[in-house]
Image (cartoon, rainbow, N blue to C red):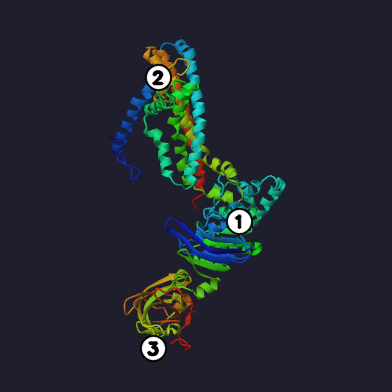
Amino acid sequence: MSQATRVTPQASAEPVWVRRTLLTVALLFLTLFLFIPLLAVFYEALRKGLGVYLAAVIDPYALAAIRLTLLSAAIAVPLNLLFGVAAAWAIAKFEFHGKSVLITLIDLPFAVSPVIAGLLYVLLFGAHGWLGPWLGAHDLQIIFAVPGIVLATVFVTVPFVARELIPLLQAQGSEEEEAALVLGASGWLTFWRITLPNMQWGLLYGVVLCTARAMGEFGAVSVVSGHIRGLTNTLPLHVEILYNEYQFAAAFACASLLTLLALVMLALKVAIERRAVRQRQAALAVEAP
Amino acid sequence: MSITIQGLRKQFGAFVALDGIDLSIPPGQLVALLGPSGCGKTTLLRIIAGLESADQGQVLFNGQDATRRHVRERGVGFVFQHYALFQHMSVFENIAFGLRVRPRATRPPEAVIRAKVAALLELVQMGWLADRYPSQLSGGQRQRIALARALAVEPQVLLLDEPFGALDTKVRKELRRWLRRLHDELHITSVFVTHDQEEALEVADQIVVMNQGRIEQIGSPQQVYDAPATPFVYQFLGNINLFHSRVHAGWAKVGGLQVRVPEYNDTKSASAMVYVRPHDIDLLREPEDASTTLAATISRVSQLGSLVRLELVQTAGGDIAEVEMTRERYAADPLQIGDLVFVKPRQARVFLQNSDTSTTPPLQWGGDGDGI
């Protein structure tokens, strides 16, 4: 208990035992629910040797799933980027009726269960859905096909970029844009030369989060996919199928791929955050006289 | 370029920001829009710039209607209170921005842009900062760069929104003198917004005093200070003492003190306010005459640099008044807390209450015979 009797340097600091308890609880929680499962994924994936691991990863169905996952992310993320920038720009820089409705709508995918989202698309575009007969007549398939998977992914990722940018743009205000306009710049030029550079880090951050979610989405995609191996299976769905077939090593091998992707995205996110903070600090450092 | 404003009105929801503004600014002048926050001065400036649109009324540049002209075609320079420099561009690129965004046909060649930016940096005395970023500059330096950036497009009109509002007192004083000199060199019609009466009095050719979306008075610094048109202007420009009084048949009475107000000869027993500036008051040790002085006790003495400020409590009624005098004058007769004195205003102004249309000149008052 010699530690506990040490005088704390700050008068405002909590007693040592409180800090220690809180820290221990937090660490225990993280270990139990994050670190151990994370390690378990890689342990289970490699348990039967590297050969089995590689075989699981280069399995044609696995490769197809990877391809589809990357494809749906590659379509969903740019769409999201466009929508997010446009919505954030409109919400932060202009006053209009229905603004709060728009903000609420952007948050909708966060509030709605992804399964419900998937179900909505089935009800809309499915063979027995509202648009099903028309789509069938024109030989267009959305549900149980790639378009449905992309749609579901787009739906669940809608809030990411916009949510990241709105507070940023609101905090920045419109003065720099106004200055550019007074100096004779067109709206387009003002956007490219002033607004976009000012939001680049927030934008990247939103894109990273959005990409991570797009690749990891399970619920919504599961409903619309139909689980056709080699055709409409994304990586998370592929993992589930392998698991259900008791191919644990292969399931964990594919899961480890997803985990790696997530870790890469996290690392990117941290790097971007650091850049953004440093930039902000540089801006604030000279603010004070 | 001259600016004419006719019947301008602007409302934000239920809030009336501008309520019928008519104003004419001759070319080459430096005009201050002065008023408390929320009086509509910034809105007026932004409407002149084209950053805001009016609900009613017109803005004319050189007699030509510019009300519908887009902000980028108005040829104005605008300086923001918080500088609004482009954070991700160097000082050089900030100033060059207005030239670089021109359409290809009218864009000057790179060499011309470089020369022009260099000249502007010279003008604002910041040549050595060209490669810095705005975050590396002090507030005063940023505002100079913002001004150089605004001047780069050779505006016909320069509009400044509280340009020194975010700076500390010393830099502010330095910068406003510098702005005055710059204006004397360039002679661009300039309008600046301020809530600081000292700033307006020192820098401007003309002052437009605004309150609650209306213009209270337009005049030279001397006119608005010496002959305020309304009680508001009197209060807003400089300190004042207020005395409650009653006006009856050409006389205003404050306790025993009587003031001749010929303009109110026909007024019968109306309540009024007497306005006296703290430096327009003499303090006497002996009562001169019951009807020209008020008895009071010194309650506080503060030394404010070159001035001494005395706080008095009137013997009758207990109202508080302030008197300012130079150190020398105070030293000649150093009054102490608790001393009984007799207050004798040298100059006062009477406004009937609920009246804001008085246009009478200030009344001379004292021993020279035309007052009491």
Which residue carries the number 2 mark? A41
Q: Residue at x 46, y 27 (%)?
A: A151
Which residue carries the number 3 mark? B289
* Comes first in the chain, label 1 or label 3: 1
Same chain check for tags 2 and 1 = no
The tag on residue B76 is 1
* x, y percent for residue A61: 47, 14
Q: Quadrant of the N terminus of chain B?
A: bottom right
Residue type, numbered disc 2 = Val
Residue type, numbered disc 3 = Asp
* x, y percent for residue A100: 41, 43
Q: Residue at x 40, y 19 (%)?
A: A41
Tell me the crowding category of disc 2: few under 14, some 14 to 19, or many 20 or more residues within 10 angstroms, Cα based. Answer: many
> What is the CA distance from the residue labelled 2 to the residue labelled 1?
64 Å
Q: Secondary structure at mark 3?
A: loop
Residue type, numbered disc 1 = Val
Q: Residue at x 29, y 39 (%)?
A: A5
Q: Quadrant of the C terminus of chain B?
A: bottom left
Tell me the crowding category of disc 1: few under 14, some 14 to 19, or many 20 or more residues within 10 angstroms, Cα based. Answer: many
